[in-house]
Image (cartoon, helix red, strand yellow):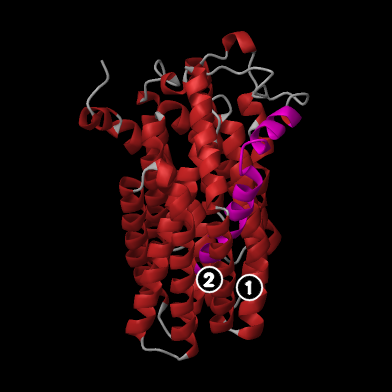
Amino acid sequence: MPLPSSRARASFFWPQFVFGLLHLALSSPMIYLALGLPLLMRQHGWSGLEIGLFQLAGVPAVFKLLLAAPIERAPDERATPAYQARRYRAWSLALGAGYGAALLALAFASIHSARPVLFALLLACVLLATWADVPVSALQIRVLPPAERARAGGVRSAAMFGAAVLGGGVMLVLSQRLGWSAPFYGMAGLLALALALLPTLRMDGAGEDDGGARPSAETGVQASPATWPALLRGFLAQPGAWRWLALLSGCFPLVGAAWVYLKPMLLGQGFAAEQVAWIVGVGGGALGAAASLLTGLLAPAARLPALLPRATWFGAAALAALAACLACQASAAWLIAASGWLACATGISASVAFGLMMERARPACQAADYGLQASFFALGRLALMPLAGWLLDGAGSAALVAALAVASAGMAALAGRWMDALARGLVHQKKERIKAL
């Protein structure tokens, strides 16, 4: 007999907590490197273009689809859902350990290290974090039933903003007080704790709500060179797949770019570095986490396509408000309010994105399908960051945010036109799960 809804939700509290902690531990260093480090760079005289170019250390995120190949590689006769879940767990532990070692290596460097050396260390961290995210996310999709995935998207987005509080706020304050190495030691310790909890998750029932789907040549899940084209064709054959990938690479990086450059922009408005850390890193991160959790709790998976254009319009309005405050040299109170609005918009957008990415992952291809979507997500962000840095240097912060607002409004209109195609894609996924039962 199925569990009542409240009991069923309670039974998945621990997995949701463990995955939330894992995403927090994986993301905090990345947030610190992406959002905290630009502030330190600006303090030490780095230009906006240099900061943007250093964001290219995130290039490995574009290749998540390729990084998923060895994770999915397994003999057909052994690739039961529980076996695949245990495989994802083993990869998560191994890559997480390597990530922790890279963080410790960064602790021995400094902002004054040779820039090629610093870039290489950042690249190693990003590579291992990106790679570890694939099996962790695939395991999350495998362990949680479809009914929990919209909520899981909210938990993941909230973890990202928790990482913004930790990596973009607390750790930034820690670096100001205790020096370069202290944040990296702290984040490596958090990662070790999260990895230690991973073996507590049950693997024996994994995949039951997806019909216990197994890899096959027809689905293209077997990650050998001969079947990867079939896997790609299978994903892209879903209704609205190309449109979804276009929106994924266009909608969310726009508010994300403004969020990345918000700290340097506020620094340029006369805020002290520690003030920026508390306002954006802690306060903004808390608002974004709350918005993410509320979105995940209140928006069922079936409503996510309809929520996408609304979330994008909300982000465009937040960007326009921030641009107006910057252009008018508004008071600190107005700038803080606009920053809070942007934090909420970013949290809602991220929650919708992660929820749709989980829904789009086919039952037997979690790692590969997630990797493909994450690659497009990262590609949009990486393509935008140097351009945004160049615009910040050449035209100023108000012009940058205004340009992002206009682009976001265009993407919102496009999302509204393509909403029905996205909804058909989710219906197709539901039918595929029913067929597997």
Residue 382 visible at all: yes
344 or 271, which lies in front? 344
Q: Amino acid at mark 1?
A: Gly
Q: Quadrant of the image for the N terminus?
A: top left
Looking at the rendered structure, the secondary structure element under dot 1 is helix
> Mark 1 near mark 2, Cβ–Cβ under 8 Å?
yes
Q: Residue at x 35, y 25 (%)?
A: 200
x and y percentages locating residue 240 in the rendered image: 61, 44
Residue 389 circle label: 1
- Return the residue found at the far top: 77
Q: Mainly helix, strand or loop, the magenta region?
A: helix
User: Which residues fall within the magenta stretch?
Assistant: 229-258
61 relative to 116, above or below = above
- On whether residue 233 falls in the magenta region, the answer is yes
Quarter of the image for residue 151 reads top left
**Dot 2 corresponds to which residue?**
261
Report crowding for label 1: few under 14, some 14 to 19, many 20 or more residues within 10 A (C-alpha). many
x and y percentages locating residue 384 in the rendered image: 64, 64
